[in-house]
Amino acid sequence: MPRPRSAHSLCRSHLAFGLVSAAALASSAVASPLHVLEKRYTDVGGYANPTAGGGKWLTLARNTWPEGLGEPINIVISANSHPALMTDEGFYDWGMSINFGTYLLDASGVGSYHGECFGQTDGARQAANLGDGNGMHNQSDLLRENFGDVTYGVCKESANGGFHYRVWRQNGTDADTGAWFLAASEEEDLSNNHMIVDNGYDLGRDEVVRRAVAPGGTKSPITNTTYTATAVNASGVGYFDNITFWDINHRISTDGVVMVLTVDVTDPGTLAAAARSTGDNAAPGTGASAADLARAASVGLFAVFALALLL
């Protein structure tokens, strides 16, 4: 279990920081660079088992008690997926199709994908060793569910709780597969310090997979790209054999199942042109609609309240 802290004071400071950050960044976002990895031959599953290279299907969480606890890595996006999924843009766009992540416009009306509220990290990053030669390294992002709201939905998840997944890329020199490794879970709200709900690791994994394999596919609200996915239970000997209940953060058990998703593109939509303005109703010089500006103003008012909490 984590070290005991005052939930009231933590909630107050986190809320204040989040609101101030949101107000400062409401009208802009820094585009993250695209990293395109050429698809290479991997094993039949489109990834390499981390344990074969000294890695683990468990993250390393921060500020745990006792130290060294982690969370299950329970989903793989196979490198046998469509080549679009081997780019940052395609991976994030697929996430949008299952209601994870956010898409923000900068002052010039250019859009970029992010995982969290206004592109800001809310909470401690976790690390993982995928056995690819990169050793233990921090997650590249955390994508929160957006409830169908591509701009502000992830902020609702951060405040009220819900599903999210942490992301790593297997691209080291020892196993340069390009596969994405996800640690999915369901968490409580901010007032409960984002504690994982009972059975939250398995519930998070199952929810992501359920959305991904929806009949008829899933469609990105940003590019209108349609994705389909197949899921395979890849768990077995050499996966969670060296992990016990006592190694898992919050001491929440897991069934040890790792699901491998192979994602295809059935209609490319406008995926290649995703980094652009998303509407003709943008206010001049802002890249935001009138409704967006109104909501940003509301965020500013909340920021004043947040500053008062910090005093």
Image (cartoon, rainbow, N blue to C red):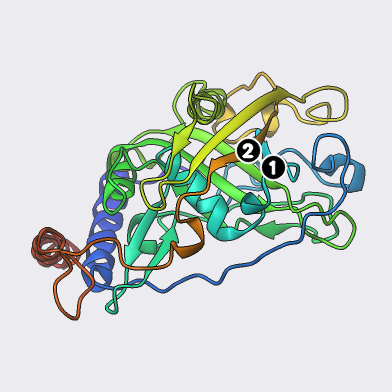
Residue on which the image places disc 2: 263
Q: Nearer the viewer, residue 132 or 196?
A: 132
**Residue 40, image x, y percentages:** 84, 54
* Tag 1 residue: 81
Q: Is residue 50 above or below residue 310?
A: above
Q: Residue at x 58, y 28 (%)?
A: 251
Which element type, helix, strand or loop, lies under badge 2? Answer: strand
What residue is drawn where x is 51% and y is 45%?
94
Q: Give the residue type that dot 1 points to.
A: Ser
- 279 relative to 240, above or below: below
Question: Residue at 69% of width from left, 33% of height from top?
Answer: 247
The residue positioned 54% from the left and 32% from the top of the image is: 250
Q: In this view, does 51 lie above or below 17?
A: above
Residue 259 x %, y %: 67, 28
Q: As drawn, is 37 to the left or to the right of 43?
A: left
Q: In the rendered view, would you say 238 is above or below 23?
A: above
Q: How many marks?
A: 2
- Quarter holding the C terminus is bottom left
Residue 307: name its quadrant: bottom left
Q: Which of 182 and 100 is in front in this view?
A: 100
Residue type at mark 2 is Val
Instruction: Label 1: state its secondary structure.
Output: loop
Disc 2 and disc 1 in contact, CB within 8 angstroms: yes
Q: Position of residue 157 (x, y in %)?
A: 33, 42
**Dot 1 crowding, Cα within 10 Å, few <14, some 14–19, many 20+:** some
Front residue of 17 and 96: 96
